[in-house]
Amino acid sequence: MGGYGSGRPGWKDKVEDYRCLDVNQLHRAGCLAPGFSGGWQWMREGERVADISLQSTGRALTLDFRFRWRGEDWKDVRQSVALASTPCRFGGTRPWFICPGVVNGTRCGRRVVKLHAGGRYFLCRHCYRLAYASQSEREFDRLLRRANKLRTALGGEPGTGALIALKPKGMHWKTYDARVAEIDQLEEAANQLFIAAFRHRWPDVSLFL
């Protein structure tokens, strides 16, 4: 990996592990407008953990920031990222970053919504070989995540040990019953997959259910 692609992450690293720039967030904040000059901050629990300086020409965004990799000295980095836009179906335009990464001598050039600080530069997840956390989930984890999303949408707590919330005010009983049935189906399917996955470790696992 060379040029802007000089980073170290691999497929086991997750998108969620790295700071990113989201073109839609920057657009809503006015950071992509021609002539913009200012900064962007990353916050955690109300505290600033990192910041970056931005300058926009409307066609490109210049990033100025400091970078340090695992104990190395801090270095000043300036990076230019081309911007593009495509028309939306119902009017207006949608902004994009054009990833400036170069991997094995091949320019990336993908239109992307997010660029990630996976190495010296902000590049797309493909250049840094980053996966989403959900991609490494086992199937029963994915089913339980969907069930928990439905549980919390009804106003309840996640987890099979929690009671499913009562019908929210204004929701039709038919809709509520369908969602409760879906939760039950998802959790039962996850339970069966879990048993199948770990039966070799606990041959009598079904005795404990």
Image: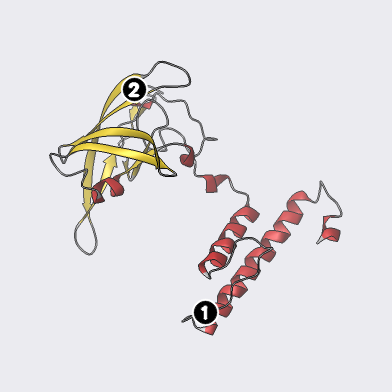
| SS for callout 1 | helix
Q: Which residue is the site of mark 2?
A: 3
| SS for callout 2 | helix
State which quarter of the image contains the N terminus.
top left
The residues tagged by marks 2 and 1 sit, at their Cα atoms, a distance apart of 54 Å
Q: Quadrant of residue 195?
A: bottom right
**Nearer the observer, disc 2 or disc 1?**
1
Residue in the foreground of this view, choosing between 107 and 193: 193
Would residue 20 be found to the left or right of residue 168 on screen? left
**Residue 40 place in picture, x, y as percent:** 29, 39
Give the residue at x 42% y 25%: 7
Q: Which residue is the site of mark 1?
A: 175
**Residue 32 place in picture, x, y as percent:** 20, 43
Residue type marked 1:
Thr
**Residue 151 place in picture, x, y as percent:** 57, 66
Outermost residue, left side: 35
**Residue 202 place in picture, x, y as percent:** 83, 49
Looking at the image, residue 109 lies above or below residue 196: above
Residue in the foreground of this view, choosing between 90 and 55: 55
Residue type marked 2:
Gly
Give the residue at x 29% y 49%: 24
Give the residue at x 22% y 48%: 85
Looking at the image, residue 147 lies above or below residue 44: below
Would residue 207 be found to the left or right of residue 150 on screen? right
Q: Tags 2 and 1 in contact by the CB under 8 Å rule?
A: no
Outermost residue, bottom side: 173
Residue in the foreground of this view, choosing between 103 and 39: 39
Would residue 91 be found to the left or right of residue 133 on screen? left
